[in-house]
Image: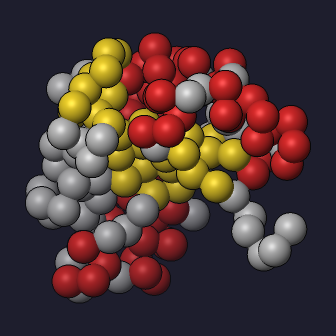
Amino acid sequence: DAGVDRVILGTHAVEHPEALRWLATEYGAERVMAGVDARGGEIAVAGWRETRGNYLRWAEVFVEQGAGALLYTNVSVEGLQQGIDPEPVRALIEAVPCPIVVAGGVTTVEDVRVLRELGAAGAVLGSALYSGRITLAGALEAAA
C-alpha cells in the first residue's frame, strides 16, 4: 500500500505462475496483472528472445493462478506504428474472463475504436502518442 495500484509480471509469471496466486491472495486479484507478450501465437519471454508455448494457454494459466487482468503485447508490431492485428486480441478476449489491456501497434484512433469494439479494457499508446500520430484527446474520444 505504498502507492502501487497494480503489479505486472512478465517472464516471472511464466517461470513461476504460482507467484500470481500468492500476490492475488496477499493483495487482491485486481492488483495483479500478467504480461502476455506474444509473437506468432507463442508467448515471448526473456526480453522477447525466447518463446514458451501458446499465448492463449498461458493466459488461461495466469487467470487460473489469480491474475485479475492481462497486458497483451503483440511484440511483432510493437513500436512499428503500423497498426494492430485484431485477431489475436479477439482470441485472447474470448479465451479469458478478465480485463485485457492491449499494447503493440496501437497507432491510430481507428485502432482504439477496434479495440473498444473487441472489448479491450484499455490500450497502451506508446510511440504513436510520443510521435504525434495519435492524440490523447482523440484516443479518449475513440474509447468512449
Horizontal and vertical percent for residue 100? 54, 42
Q: Is residue 144 visible?
A: yes
Using the image as rendered, state which of residue 95 and residue 41 is in the foreground: 41
Q: Position of residue 17 (x, y in %)?
A: 59, 26
Residue located 48% across and 28% down the image: 15
Quadrant (top left/top right/bottom left/bottom right) for the C terminus: bottom right
Instruction: Give x and y (percent) for residue 134.
Output: 29, 77
Q: How is the image coloured?
A: secondary structure
| Residue 86 in sight from this viewpoint | no
User: Toward the viewer: 110 or 76?
Assistant: 76
Closer to us: 21 or 60 = 21
> Measuring 87% from the left and 43% from the top, which residue is drawn there?
26
* Vertical order, 109 against 70 (above or below): below
Task: Describe residue 27's horizontal placement relative to residue 140 as left or right.
Answer: right
Q: Residue visible at 46% across and 14% down?
A: 57
Residue shown at 38% from the left, 34% from the top: 89
Q: Looking at the image, how many numbered discs can be counted on the residues? A: 0
- Image quadrant where one finds the N terminus: bottom right
Q: Position of residue 5 (x, y in %)?
A: 74, 64
Quadrant of residue 25 within the rendered picture: top right
Q: Is residue 112 above or below residue 91?
A: below
**Front-most of 2 and 137?**
2
Q: Could you say which quadrant of the image residue 43 lies in?
A: top left
